[in-house]
Image (cartoon, rainbow, N blue to C red):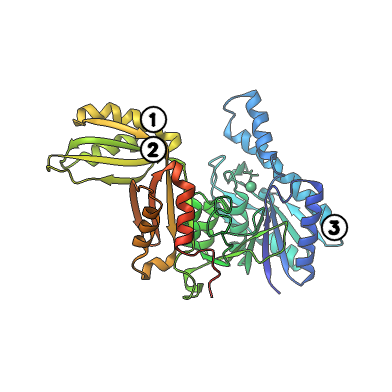
Amino acid sequence: MALIVQKYGGTSVGSVDRIEVVADRVCSAARQGNQVVVVVSAMSGETNRLIALAKAIAPQPSPRELDVLMSTGEQVTIALLAIALEKRGCAARSYTGGQVQILTDNVYTKARIRDIDDERVRSDLGEGRIVVVAGFQGVDEAGNITTLGRGGSDTTAVALAAALKADECQIYTDVDGVYTADPRLVPQARRLDRITFEEMLEMASLGSKVLQIRSVEFAGKYHVPLRVLSSFQEGAGTLIVSEEKKPVEDPIISGIAHNHDEAQITVLGVPDQPGVAYRILGPVADANIEVDMIVQNVGPDGTTTDFTFTVHRNDYEQALEIVRQNGSSLGAREVSGNKRIAKISLVGVGMRSHAGIASTMFRALADERINIRMISTSEIKISVVVEEKYMELGVRALHDAFRLDQVPS
Ligand code: ASP
Ligand code: MG
């Protein structure tokens, strides 16, 4: 008998009909002899609807009250699912985060889970019941309702799986797994059978929004086997595992991620002296703006240098203003910016033990006459910044170059 935690997202419980479909799946998992805990999100669109209601009253509603409000979305779906399960003769009980208890810190709207009291869940499971838990919410020490940040139901599921030492945490969503690239850009993209936590984190942080990043971190830290699969079609989905569990014969590159969330800022002709990077980026950091890629050139004459970095597009105007203000005191010749950039990244743990990946990547881009503006690397990733208009072409060219459409033999 296995203990499985299943999580269904907002689209999977988006209507009464869909909740009935979920109930069929959950009942069948239980009837196969598994102990099943189900975590659900609010019906799709519901959380946004609730936030809009609050904002219609006050533009900046109190975070505490927002959490009281937002948590109601999940309370609706747990009850409806439990009703649907009971109708099928599958004994079930629903619980809010506060009832379980999922104890969090008191940072409203982005609380972190501190502890889970699994006693109630275990005793229900022991009595043969399916346990349905509201995702995305918890309670702080003082009993205040908290929420875990948008998409937080994934984190609830993983945390419950860790606390219960579940055999698997299954995240049911509207995609049937993790792909070698975004299928909307690359029709030949292939669903991966397996990916490592580290790779998944890179893919997620680079814009493949299949799972909430924090849930992947959590699963990796506690070694919770995590499976992403579709609630609308059959299939094994993608299993996210620790690196030791990944067969060595798996391909070197797992996937290609892309995003166009960043913008570039360039400072031309600053004195090539100690402290320059600090003087440019210090004030940016002081404004709580995160910097991603950084490139500094060796100046041609050894007296001046050029400095380029990227920030999130939402922070671009502010960062540019800060650097412009500092530019003159730095003695910079010019400060310029560019919002029309995109980042393309090759991700794969196999890179640790293989040379030549970067040159294959650069050649593939060169063959398409795509100019690389910045490069950064880590042990399992190579990222390049290119002009935004070449993003799709670049992703496709790399998908071809590394033959990611071919099923590994
Ligand atoms: N309902 C919440 C949201 O929309 C949590 C979740 O769906 O995971 O962000
Ligand atoms: Mg969601």
State which mark lies toward you, 1 or 3.
Answer: 1
Q: Nearer the viewer, residue 183 or 96?
A: 183
Question: Which residue position holds label 2?
Answer: 289
State which mark lies toward you, 2 or 3.
Answer: 2
Amino acid type of the residue tagged 3 in the rendering: Glu
Place of residue 330 in the rendered image (x, y in percent of width and height, measured from the top left): 20, 31
**Where 283 falls versus 12 (above or below)?**
above
* Disc number for residue 318: 1
For marks 1 and 3, give the CA distance. 54 Å
* Disc number for residue 86: 3
For marks 2 and 1, give the CA distance. 9 Å
State which mark lies toward you, 2 or 1.
Answer: 1
Amino acid type of the residue tagged 1 in the rendering: Gln
Tell me the element at label 2.
Answer: loop
Q: Quadrant of the N terminus?
A: bottom right
Place of residue 277 in the rendered image (x, y in percent of width and height, measured from the top left): 24, 41
Q: Residue at x 83, y 52 (%)?
A: 83
For marks 2 and 3, give the CA distance. 50 Å
Place of residue 103 in the rendered image (x, y in percent of width and height, measured from the top left): 59, 51
Amino acid type of the residue tagged 2 in the rendering: Ile
Report whether the residue tagged 1 is closer than 8 Å to ligand 1.
no
Q: Residue at x 34, y 38 (%)?
A: 285
Mark 1 Cα-neighbour bin, 10 Å: few <14, some 14–19, many ≥20:
some
